[in-house]
């Protein structure tokens, strides 16, 4: 009876795959992102239900896992703060890699416990006749899954500031990485030659997992906070690739499709992040960006910052006819997105044209600022990209920078010795007046002094962003 359900299971998998693709497409637009998330969720639910129809499934353990996972997910999602969303994404990426690793481990153990012919029968129709194909998939999944898990956990520790967010480097680091990669290749060759014979393949498989864990750590260690959006998207891609490889092991079509979609979209997003910083992926992974000072780290920035009070800032904004908000991680830390929206509404009521310009690498994960502004119900049509607003920035009356730093640093276009040089920025320094909301003059994630703070048209509004914006909102309400 269960075997007769196989065609139905395949049809459900096709429907689920289509829903994944449609949902992913909807996620590319802010106005449809929430619906896209729901569509993808429905697709995953269908895939899980279809998988439960397969022969040999233990429904008791599935129920236990479903209850435990649902409980943890509901509690975690309801308790996590928006400022902690990047590290939560890091954890989820890591758990995805760990799940794929465990699938490979379980299937290898099963294969090792029986002859290839018997194990081949458990795979069902469509299974490869050669054990080499399955062995390669197991080895690949073990390495990538382990890398994703350890790398994501280290990224979580950096993002949550449990360890330093600065690049961690040591002498001979690239040499060590090279040795680990050679060790992985050697262990993979040994494993794939005879995966079911004696203790040697077990030792080789264990070595693959251990080396993958080490490589994940050594790959993320030299990456600083300024590059965390790239790391998050890259690890997300790794988790998808590991899932797709696990799908080849157990011959699950929907897992292959879902993993390939996540892997491909993560790679594309990583490329977009790198382009937004005008840097190659190799430079992000191996340069140790922000690890220390250099001649171009802004040490030569001179001048005097011009502070401004909230009352004086009100008069500047009250006379403005066009205003561009530029949010950064400081807005997330202060949880100021709702009051920023209130200030935007007050400016609109006063006759100003209001826009919100978001840099692709603002915050600590891709789309971080978009999520915050969406949470505050900022209209989608008011969100603009740097390429749209930079050409007309000279005509903008006031640019308000809220907690952003590196993405507005003029050194990216003025100082050829700066580590930021060549990175496309939001050119707020070209606005008639630029008001920067920050607690201090400290540099951003990249550790580069910001020349914007000392420009003649810049006014520094020091203090907590939320409290400061509340003062501005109150001033508009009182007058």
Image (cartoon, rainbow, N blue to C red):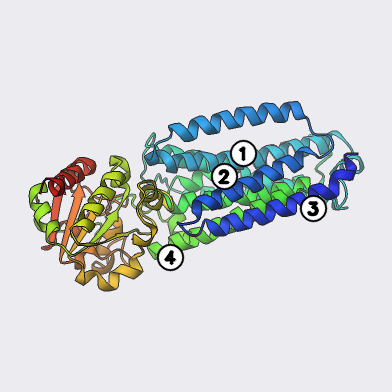
Q: Secondary structure at mark 2?
A: helix
Q: Residues within 10 Å of mark 3 (few under 14, many from 20)?
A: some
* Mark 1 vs mark 3: in front: 1
Quadrant assignment, res 56:
top right
- Residue picked out by circle 4: 275
Q: Is residue 20 above or below residue 111?
A: below
Q: Secondary structure at mark 4?
A: helix
Alpha carbons under labels 1 and 3: distance apart: 22 Å
Which residue is pictured at 54% across the width and 58% down the height?
Answer: 26
Q: Secondary structure at mark 3?
A: helix
Circles 2 and 1: CB atoms closer than 8 Å: yes
- Residue picked out by circle 1: 98
Is residue 186 in view from this perspective?
no
- Residue picked out by circle 3: 133
Alpha carbons under labels 4 and 3: distance apart: 36 Å
* Nearer-the-camera pick, 435 or 231: 435
Q: Quick one: label 2 or label 1, which is nearer the N terminus?
A: 1
Q: Quick one: label 2 or label 4, which is nearer the N terminus?
A: 2
Q: Residues within 10 Å of mark 4 (few under 14, many from 20)?
A: some
Name the mark on residue 148. Answer: 2
Circles 3 and 2: CB atoms closer than 8 Å: no
Circles 2 and 4: CB atoms closer than 8 Å: no
Alpha carbons under labels 3 and 2: distance apart: 22 Å
* Mark 4 vs mark 3: in front: 4
């Amino acid at each position: 009876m269960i075997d007769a359900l196989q065609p139905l299971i395949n049809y459900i998998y096709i429907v689920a795959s289509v829903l994944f693709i449609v949902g992913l497409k909807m996620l590319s637009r802010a106005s449809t992102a929430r619906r896209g998330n729901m569509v993808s969720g429905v697709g995953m639910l269908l895939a899980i239900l279809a998988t439960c129809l397969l022969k040999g499934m233990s429904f008791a353990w599935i129920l236990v896992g479903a209850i435990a996972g649902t409980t943890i997910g509901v509690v975690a999602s309801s308790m996590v703060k928006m400022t902690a969303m990047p590290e939560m994404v890091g954890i989820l990426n890591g758990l995805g890699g760990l799940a794929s690793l465990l699938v490979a481990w379980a299937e290898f153990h099963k294969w090792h416990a029986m002859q290839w012919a018997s194990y081949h029968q458990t795979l069902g129709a469509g299974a490869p006749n050669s054990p080499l194909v399955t062995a390669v998939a197991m080895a690949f999944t073990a390495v990538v899954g382990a890398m994703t898990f350890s790398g994501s956990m280290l990224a979580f520790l950096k993002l949550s500031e449990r360890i330093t967010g600065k690049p961690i480097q040591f002498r001979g680091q690239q040499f060590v990485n090279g040795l680990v990669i050679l060790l992985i290749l050697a262990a993979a060759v040994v494993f794939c030659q005879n995966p079911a014979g004696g203790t040697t393949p077990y030792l080789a498989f264990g070595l693959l997992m251990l080396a993958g864990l080490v490589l994940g750590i050594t790959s993320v260690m030299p990456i600083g906070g300024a590059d965390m959006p790239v790391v998050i998207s890259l690890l997300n891609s790794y988790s998808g690739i590991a899932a797709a490889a696990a799908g080849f092991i157990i011959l699950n079509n929907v897992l292959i499709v879902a993993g390939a979609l996540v892997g491909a979209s993560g790679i594309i997003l990583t490329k977009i992040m790198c382009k937004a910083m005008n840097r190659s992926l190799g430079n992000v992974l191996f340069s140790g960006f922000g690890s220390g000072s250099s001649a171009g780290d802004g040490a030569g920035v001179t001048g005097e910052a011009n502070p401004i009070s909230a009352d004086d800032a009100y008069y500047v904004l009250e006379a403005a006819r066009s205003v561009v908000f530029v949010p950064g991680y400081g807005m997330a830390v202060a949880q100021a997105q709702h009051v920023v929206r209130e200030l935007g509404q007050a400016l609109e009521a006063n006759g100003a044209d209001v826009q919100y310009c978001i840099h692709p690498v603002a915050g600590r994960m891709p789309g971080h600022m978009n999520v915050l502004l969406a949470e505050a119900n900022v209209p989608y049509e008011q969100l603009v990209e740097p390429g749209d607003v930079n050409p007309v920035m000279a005509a903008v009356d006031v640019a308000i920078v809220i907690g952003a730093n590196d993405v507005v640093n003029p050194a990216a276009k003025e100082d050829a010795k700066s580590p930021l040089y060549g990175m496309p920025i939001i050119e707020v320094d070209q606005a008639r007046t630029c008001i920067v909301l920050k607690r201090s003059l400290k540099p951003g994630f990249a550790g580069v002094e910001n020349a914007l703070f000392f420009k003649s048209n810049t006014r520094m509004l020091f203090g907590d962003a939320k409290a400061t914006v509340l003062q501005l909102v109150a001033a508009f309400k009182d007058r």
